[in-house]
Amino acid sequence: MLEDSTNEKDDSPTFAFLSLTQIDSLLEQDVNGIQSKFEEILNFNDCQTNLKEAVMVDYFVSGFWWGKERKFTSQQLAGFMELLHELLDNLATKHMTLEENLIELSRALTGIGKSHLNGKGRLRSLTVEQAKDIIDHFKIGLFQHYKLYEYMFSFQRDEKVISAQGQLRSSHKVSRMLLSWKTSTPRTYEIGPEFSIHCSW
């Protein structure tokens, strides 16, 4: 995962994960092109057999397509993709709990829609309604399936053995569940337990 080195300025926020140029290039692609671009951006070359690579590419492709369908501007998409990257990195690298990541999401969205506050710089161009939509996106995606993501990132052995060794039943089950999300068209994830997040604005 990339380290967040965002240089936030009052007049022109910059983005550590994807530049505006990269965002504009992605907007010109269909879903297959977006997937290929993210494989290049993440430097992944084994998505057909590597569980982590496949799930992470799908996570970003689905998120980008979701924002594109909602007519986010390039700057809004860049900020949203930065948030997607940050929350996944919090889980994968910093090993934050679900509760801790919920707090980070709340902090990231603080100030949106208030004229005397700029939010977190990179997200200040979002509207209150867009922020609520983003909360819903995480509710039915990353947060709903948090335990599965935690298991995937804590699994120590090469994911390729998951499909090769039938005796690893629990790991194999998780891999099937996670990889079942991958489809030619990004969609809302439908598996996993019910999870509710209460946010006030």
Image (cartoon, rainbow, N blue to C red):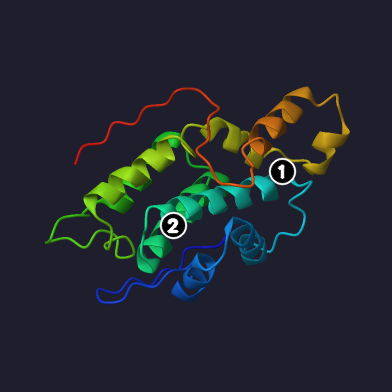
Q: Foreground: 135 or 94? A: 135
Q: Report the amino acid beneath label 2.
A: Lys
* Residue 77, percent from left and from top: 41, 61
* Residue 103, percent from left and from top: 34, 42
Identify the mark at residue 83; answer none if there is no mark.
Answer: none
Please, what secondary structure does the residue beneath circle 1 have? helix
C-alpha separation, residue under disc 2 versus residue under disc 1: 26 Å
Q: Report the amino acid beneath label 1.
A: Leu
* Residue 189, percent from left and from top: 53, 35
Question: Could you tell me which residue is drawn at 84 percent across and 38 percent down?
Answer: 161
Q: Give the class, few, some or many, for how many residues have Cα within 10 Å of label 2's Cα (few <14, many ≥20).
A: some
Q: Please tell me whether residue 64 is drawn above or below residue 92 in the rendered image.
A: below
Identify the mark at residue 51; answer none if there is no mark.
Answer: 1
Please, what secondary structure does the residue beneath circle 2 have? helix
Mark before the other along the chain sequence, 2 or 1: 1
Q: Please tell me whether residue 194 is drawn above or below residue 130 in the rendered image.
A: above
Q: Which residue is mark 2?
A: 68
